[in-house]
Amino acid sequence: MIDGLVAGRLYGDCEQRTDKTGRPFSVAKVRASTAEAEMLFVNVIAFEASVCSGLHQLRDGDSVALAGSLTPRVWTDKQGITRPALDMVAHRLLTLQAG
């Protein structure tokens, strides 16, 4: 497990789901840029109420920074190109919203 901080923009809206035991959680996707200016998708899952609540206040394209545990992986796009991705269990959330 890698502890990390990811900053980017929300890709789509956050979804609230419920696990088999009835515990709510949220899932979201964040699009972040790499040092080589490529896009990297981060699949986010959050269980803490404050993080879930903050994610649900955001909309597609809003800036967000998340801290949590990261798991790297790869996926293949429609053109057959292998791309990197990250899965994150988010523990903290930082947003820039006008008050």
Image (tube, rainbow, N blue to C red):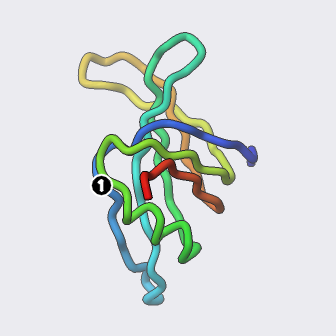
Left or right relative to 40: residue 56:
left
Residue for point 42% across, 35% down = 31
Residue at the top extreme of this rendering: 36
Measured as percent of width and height from the top left, residue 20 is found at 43, 84
Q: Residue at x 49, y 13 (%)?
A: 37
Query: Residue extending furthest left?
Result: 78
Q: Residue at x 46, y 71 (%)?
A: 53
Question: Quick one: quadrant of the C terminus?
Answer: bottom left
Badge 1 local density, few (<14 within 10 Å), some, or many (20+)? some
The residue singled out by tag 1 in the image is: 13
* Camera-side residue of 3 and 95: 95
Label 1 sits on a secondary structure element that is loop
How many numbered badges does the structure rendering display? 1
Q: Is residue 49 above or below residue 51?
A: below
Q: Is residue 35 above or below residue 85?
A: above
- Percent from the top left, x then y, of residue 78? 24, 24
Q: Determine which quarter of the picture holds residue 72.
A: top right
Does residue 67 sit above or below 57 in this rendering?
A: above
Q: Position of residue 93 (x, y in %)?
A: 58, 57
Which residue shows up at 52% across the image and 51% down it?
Answer: 95
Viewed as shown, does residue 28 lie left or right of 6? left
